[in-house]
Image: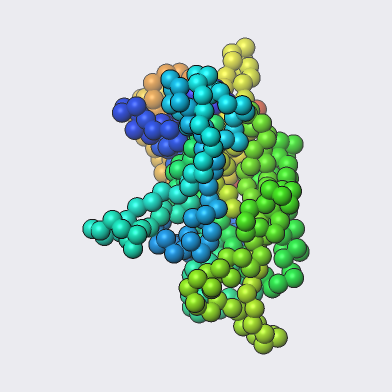
């Protein structure tokens, strides 16, 4: 884990937020390559969940929602963790279920008795700070989709079964954020609420369970042997859940949740209907009956996918008797898919290399690398950021109008005419 964390900062993937002021626990910024990685993840998810289907529509709801929403959903009473505070030297706070005994794991001081701590960030709208102006930063995107359910039904042609998908920021005031970006206080979620007829939830639950696992393996290229399903026992289910399965990854700190697939039954629509006094039932055009649809929810954090991809791709090997660090990123998620590398800084070579770059832009994620150092050092840098292919422009290019494609994983090279370069790269990337 430490090597990957160091690489993410060194190579511009992830930085501690506000580092020059000491940083803040549970908050991280994404650098140039981290932004590209997250964008690729978001676009692949949206393409798979929305664009390639005819039964899912998108939504973008607000980050701030009134307290009535969270009272109805149960978050004000149920979205809590047990907290214990050290009374000794360090004064740290701990989740009660993460410590054993009555001694602080950090300094050995005594711990307070557990008390419940709500994980939502509270604020106020307007100049008055009273109960009537209380709002909360959303800890999930799901509730926006439930409270807009009626609007989506009335403004589109969707029919049950159908889904509403959303991507966006969420906030949780975690007691003990940790394991790098695995558990954060500000993070990004991708959630789908898939509405089905009551009684058809089991079939849909199994479908989305398998569909989501396939996405990680086939689209993101994550090692299937390091993924597993974990079915939550009845006694540990969330207050809204009939059944929940997690897709877990084998992290360096143990198995941890990557994505959760929950059968929320009709809990959310029912409680919002009761609280808001608004009819949220669905009129089935085939049977002419009204009912509250049940909901299957696949939900995942972009940050967790990002660190999973980086951990899964990290490798150290030896090439030409020299050690190297390499990220074996799937081309779908690589921040840079193709690096164009002139052999030297001579004007005639850089001009040719820039023409090659221009011919590839728009089809691939491109980086032009004419930084100092040997061609070997530039290859190593691209290996560390996970670039699958380097295109080298050399002096022969000026004569034969061909370039060399160097493959990251095998380090093999092939000569290709510039006229056919884009097609060959498309074939290699798949």
Whether 74 is drawn above or below 186: the answer is below
- Which residue is depicted at the point 48% across and 51% down? 139
In the picture, the quarter occupied by the N terminus is: top right
Residue 123 lies, with reference to residue 180, above or below; the image says: below
Q: Which image quadrant for residue 413?
A: top right
- Say if 67 sits above or below 319 in the image: below
The answer to whether one can see residue 424 in this image is no
Residue for point 54% across, 26% down: 4
Image location (x, y in percent) of residue 305? 57, 42
Q: Is residue 342 left or right of residue 234?
A: left
Residue 104 appears in the picture as rendered: yes
Q: How many marks?
A: 0
Front residue of 419 and 33: 33
Q: Position of residue 104 (x, y in %)?
A: 53, 24
* Rendering coords of residue 375 (x, y %): 48, 21
Q: Position of residue 355 (x, y in %)?
A: 40, 40
Q: Is residue 8 left or right of residue 50?
A: left
- Give the image quarter of residue 19: top left
Q: Residue at x 68, y 35 (%)?
A: 255
Q: Nearer the viewer, residue 107 or 172?
A: 107
Residue at image x 66%, y 65%?
Answer: 265
Foreground of the two, 56 or 189: 189
In the orientation shown, which residue stands out farthest toward the bottom?
288
In the displayed image of the protein, which residue is found farthest to the front? 113
Please, is residue 41 above or below residue 281 in the view?
above
Q: Residue furthest left?
A: 127
Q: Quick check: 243 left or right of 138? A: right
């Amino acid at each position: 884990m430490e090597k990957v964390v160091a690489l993410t900062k060194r190579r511009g993937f992830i930085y501690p937020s506000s580092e020059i002021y000491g940083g803040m626990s549970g908050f991280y910024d994404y650098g140039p390559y981290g932004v590209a990685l997250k964008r690729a993840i978001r676009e692949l998810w949206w393409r798979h969940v929305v664009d390639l289907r005819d039964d899912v529509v998108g939504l973008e709801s607000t980050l701030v929602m009134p307290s009535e929403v969270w009272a109805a959903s149960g978050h004000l009473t149920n979205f809590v963790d047990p907290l214990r505070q050290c009374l000794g030297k360090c004064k740290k706070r701990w989740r009660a279920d993460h410590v054993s005994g009555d001694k602080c794991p950090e300094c050995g001081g005594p711990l307070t008795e557990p008390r419940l701590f709500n994980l939502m960030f509270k604020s106020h709208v307007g100049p008055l700070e009273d109960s009537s102006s209380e709002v909360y930063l959303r800890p999930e995107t799901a509730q926006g989709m439930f409270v807009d359910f009626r609007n989506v039904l009335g403004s589109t042609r969707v029919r049950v079964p159908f889904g509403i998908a959303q991507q966006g920021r969420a906030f949780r005031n975690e007691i003990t954020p940790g394991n790098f970006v695995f558990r954060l206080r500000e993070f990004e979620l991708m959630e789908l609420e898939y509405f089905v007829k009551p009684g058809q939830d089991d079939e849909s639950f199994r479908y989305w369970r398998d569909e989501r696992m396939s996405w990680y393996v086939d689209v993101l290229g994550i090692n299937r042997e390091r993924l597993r399903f974990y079915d939550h026992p009845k006694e540990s289910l969330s207050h809204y859940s009939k059944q929940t399965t997690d897709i877990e990854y084998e992290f360096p700190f143990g198995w941890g949740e990557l994505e959760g697939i929950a059968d929320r039954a009709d809990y959310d629509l029912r409680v919002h209907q009761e609280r808001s006094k608004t009819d949220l039932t669905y009129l089935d055009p085939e049977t002419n009956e009204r009912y509250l649809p049940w909901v299957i929810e696949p939900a995942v954090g972009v940050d967790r996918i990002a660190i999973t991809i980086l951990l899964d791709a990290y490798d150290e090997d030896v090439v030409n008797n020299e050690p190297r660090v390499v990220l074996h990123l799937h081309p779908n998620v690589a921040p840079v898919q193709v690096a164009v590398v002139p052999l030297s800084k001579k004007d005639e070579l850089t001009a040719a290399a820039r023409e090659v770059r221009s011919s590839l832009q728009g089809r691939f994620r491109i980086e032009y690398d004419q930084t100092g150092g040997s061609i070997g050092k530039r290859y190593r840098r691209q290996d560390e950021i996970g670039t699958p292919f380097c295109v080298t422009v050399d002096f022969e290019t000026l004569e034969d109008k061909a370039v060399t494609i160097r493959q990251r994983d095998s380090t093999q090279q092939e000569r290709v005419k510039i006229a056919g370069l884009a097609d060959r790269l498309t074939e290699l990337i798949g």
